[in-house]
Image: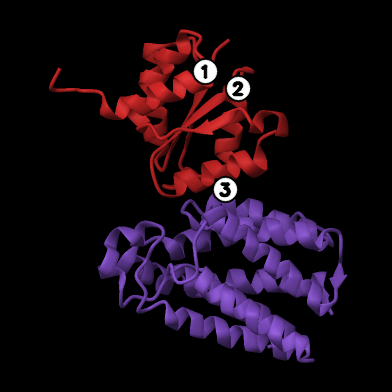
Chain colours: A purple, B red
């Protein structure tokens, strides 16, 4: 079971870790992009926190919609519409629910992932955030299908996301500004995959009470 | 009535400057700027773009001119998710260059041309000779 309270805690935890890791994200982005991913994400999530204050006991649909709208207006870079699409699509999938079964949370995350795919039209191994999300969601589904509790399943997803991030290092970027670098994008960890891992980790930490 | 134009740039100043330039050429056409983020930082904002599209619309469609990168994603998001449903099918993102394309498109729109013709004019601006007449 996953509740709106946990969803709010997840969003707040995400805002915290994005802020903590802003310099690292920006440094990764400076190597192969335009060097603003950390600052942009931190700015977006600061606005998310402000918007949360205006919501009283939101259902998941309105919570994630508010997150998505904040990100698309404030982030500025491509991660704005991409993460915006993630949260908007997840909000649409979960609708007015204030608590959902584990597999519905997984379906919500999957809908968010599909939203990112539809918006960005990237393929796996293009060195994007999909390379963290895809293995994470596969691991989550497999763990839940195998009878794991949500906390354990999300830990498995977090490990898979982290491995996915590491696996972006040898890839050649085929999307976004990093793709202009071609071969020279090899050897660098993708900043979008890195921030996606932070989001998955925040969810696992909140559900596991860490 | 004419096709409306929206100028999307990572810089609010660039977007406003292009609008100023286009207005000089074809003052009767609605050209709206959507540059920078909601806070005026460098970047693009789907919410600002959607508002500009609504403001530029007079019923004949809206052509959106974009600079690069996230401008395209933000404009697509604005059209797919944020503008009114009745308007959605009448908005197009142009392949044309943002400065020359907007100016030429404004002139074309001022003649009462439809969205197709205005977009074609914007795209053609990319290969318009400047030095070699």
Determine crowd level at label 2: few under 14, some 14-19, many 20+ residues with C-alpha closer than 10 A: many
For label 3, the residue is A73
Pick the front one: A67 or A84: A84
- Point out residue B27 in the picture as x, y percentages from the top left corner: 44, 11
Determine crowd level at label 1: few under 14, some 14-19, many 20+ residues with C-alpha closer than 10 A: many
Q: Image quarter for residue A171?
A: bottom left
**Residue appearing at x 78%, y 90% in the figure:** A149
The CA span between labels 3 and 2 is 21 Å
For label 1, the residue is B30
**Residue appearing at x 35%, y 32% in the figure:** B97
Please give the chain letter of the residue carrying mark 2: B
The CA span between labels 2 and 1 is 8 Å
Determine if residue B33 is in view: yes
Task: Tell whether label 1 touches label 2 (CB within 8 Å).
Answer: yes
Task: Tell whether label 2 touches label 3 (CB within 8 Å).
Answer: no
- Point out residue B63 in the picture as x, y percentages from the top left corner: 50, 27
Please give the chain letter of the residue carrying mark 3: A
Pick the front one: A144 or B5: A144
Q: Image quarter for residue A108?
A: bottom right
Q: Is residue A107 left or right of residue B94?
A: right
- Point out residue B80 in the picture as x, y percentages from the top left corner: 63, 42
Name the disc covering residue B57, or none: 2
Please give the chain letter of the residue carrying mark 1: B
Callout 2: SS = loop
């Amino acid at each position: 079971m996953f509740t709106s309270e946990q969803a709010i805690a997840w969003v707040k935890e995400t805002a915290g870790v994005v802020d903590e890791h802003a310099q690292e994200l920006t440094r990764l982005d400076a190597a192969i992009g335009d060097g603003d991913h950390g600052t942009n994400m931190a700015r977006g999530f600061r606005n998310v926190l402000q918007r949360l204050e205006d919501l009283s006991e939101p259902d998941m649909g309105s919570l994630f919609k508010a997150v998505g709208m904040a990100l698309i207006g404030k982030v500025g870079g491509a991660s704005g519409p991409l993460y915006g699409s993630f949260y908007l699509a997840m909000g649409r999938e979960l609708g007015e629910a204030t608590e959902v079964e584990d597999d519905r949370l997984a379906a919500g995350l999957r809908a968010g992932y599909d939203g990112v795919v539809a918006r960005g039209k990237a393929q796996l191994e293009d060195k994007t955030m999909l390379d963290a999300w895809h293995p994470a969601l596969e691991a989550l589904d497999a763990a839940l299908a195998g009878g794991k509790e949500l906390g354990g399943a999300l830990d498995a997803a977090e490990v898979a996301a982290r491995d996915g991030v590491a696996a972006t290092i040898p890839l050649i970027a085929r999307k976004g500004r990093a793709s202009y670098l071609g071969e020279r994008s090899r050897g660098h960890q993708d900043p979008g995959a890195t921030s996606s891992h932070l989001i998955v980790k925040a969810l696992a930490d909140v559900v596991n009470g860490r | 009535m004419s096709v409306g134009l929206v100028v999307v740039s990572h810089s609010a100043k660039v977007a406003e400057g292009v609008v100023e330039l286009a207005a000089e050429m074809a003052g009767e056409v609605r050209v709206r700027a959507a540059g920078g983020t909601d806070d005026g930082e460098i970047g693009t904002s789907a919410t600002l773009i959607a508002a500009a599209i609504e403001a530029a619309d007079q019923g004949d469609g809206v052509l959106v001119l974009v600079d690069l990168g996230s401008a395209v994603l933000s404009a697509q998001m604005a059209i797919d998710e944020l503008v009114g449903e009745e308007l959605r099918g009448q908005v197009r993102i142009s392949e044309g260059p943002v400065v020359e394309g907007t100016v030429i498109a404004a002139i074309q729109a001022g003649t009462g041309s439809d969205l197709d013709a205005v977009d074609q004019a914007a795209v053609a601006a990319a290969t318009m000779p400047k030095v070699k007449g």
